[in-house]
Amino acid sequence: MKILLISMTLFSLSLTSLAHEMYKREIQTIYTENINYQKMKWRFLAASENEAILELLKMIKSSDTGVKLITRARSVAAEQGMTLTDVIIPSGGSLTDTTLIRKFNPSTPEHVAYESRTKVFLNRDLSVLDATLDLAHELAHFAFRSPFNPYVGHFDMKNFVTSTIEGRGGEVDAYLIECRVYDEVFRSRLGKKNNCELVKEKNKYSRKMAINEFYKVGAFHEEFSKVLKELEINEKEFSFVSPKQVVFVSSAYSLPYPLAAVKEYYTIMGKACENDRKRMAYARQTLGRAPASKKRSPSSLRAVEKLEMSYLKRCSHISSK
């Protein structure tokens, strides 16, 4: 019986591999002759934008890297109770956006439940080539990056910057996946992608080289130093940020990634701290309204005190900025 099961498994794997190769050839036949990848806008791949997204996913899936990426992304979408196409939305720009939902009762604001929802937005004005790569890039964030919760724990700016750039599912990982998809889908037709070649060593992609490239801020180095000085942060803590010429710029902020990450940090923490101020106000009001005969329990009082201490630890430098 064991031998039979092993044989069936091997047969199944060989069929899967064969089907994948046939699928890749089918995609190559369909698209090579009829599409100008660099000029045609992706939304014209089909009668509707949703159908066109399916075509982009087919192109990504025609690569070995893309198969693994989409398999993981589908799993993450399912955890949110959605299909992969549910989370991909045509938009004015390409980005991955996570909404963190806090749930608490105003009468017991010390007890909070968190729920996150992540969606991928795809710039509807991109060419087929750029849309395929943007989608692969954003799906890498969606599939592998852990949602950031600014209400729990202590996240300083340095950790946020390094996590955004070189953490799992961060900008470096997403870019390397994007480059591999390009090589496996487009390179044979369109040649090398110059920026991807910058992060190769001996013809292999180098994560270390990619990290170095993403920390280049060029002419923005003086501005970055000024920000650190204002925050009373020793520049030596960010010695990995380089004044060399910028290669990679954040599309969301039109800034080199270290500076874009700093801006994102203060945007997120600013909103989180504002929300926590409201939550503390609820807590104080609730305690103040409690009649003497129904004083809140010591555990409730400690929970509110803990909330206030957490707020001060995470937000003192944010509220003073």
Image (spheres, helix red, strand yellow):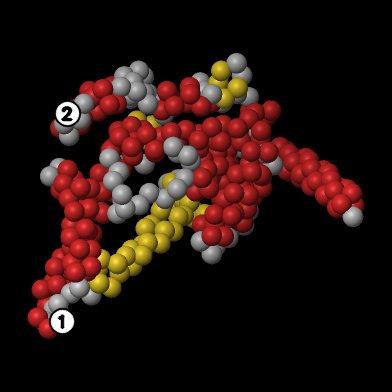
From the viewer's perspective, is the residue at label 1 or at label 2 nearer?
A: 1
Instruction: Say which residue appears at 59% left-offset and 49% top-offset.
Output: 72
Q: Position of residue 291 (x, y in %)?
A: 11, 81
Work out whether residue 137 or residue 274 is closer to the camera in this orientation and state it.
274
**Residue found at the very far front of the displayed protein:** 298
Kindly identify the amino acid type of the residue bearing the numbered disc 1.
Lys
The first of marks 1 and 2 along the sequence is 2
The image quadrant of residue 244 is: top left
Residue 32, image x and y in percent? 71, 37
Label 1: which secondary element = helix
> Residue 174 location, x and y as percent?
50, 37
Residue 213, x across and y down, in percent: 43, 24
Residue 119 vs residue 148, the one in the foreground: 148
Q: Residue at position x 90%, y 52% from top?
A: 4
Label 2 sits on a secondary structure element that is helix
At horizontal 26% and vertical 54% (from top left) the residue drawn is 272
User: Which dot marks residue 113?
Assistant: none
**What is the spatial separation of the Cα atoms under label 1 and label 2, in whole angstroms?**
50 Å
The kind of residue on which mark 2 rests is Lys
Q: Residues within 10 Å of mark 2 (few under 14, many from 20)?
A: few
Query: Residue at the spot x=57%, y=50% of the render?
Result: 73
Above or below: residue 176 compared with residue 132: above
User: In the image, 226: left or right of 35?
Assistant: left
Q: Which residue position is annotated with label 1?
A: 294
- Mark 1, other Cα within 10 Å: few <14 / some 14–19 / many ≥20: few
Q: How many marks?
A: 2
Which quarter of the image is occupied by the C terminus? Answer: top left
Q: Are marks 1 and 2 in contact (CB under 8 Å)?
A: no
Quadrant in the picture for residue 33? top right
Which quarter of the rendered picture does the N terminus lie within? Answer: bottom right
Reading the image, the residue beneath label 2 is 229
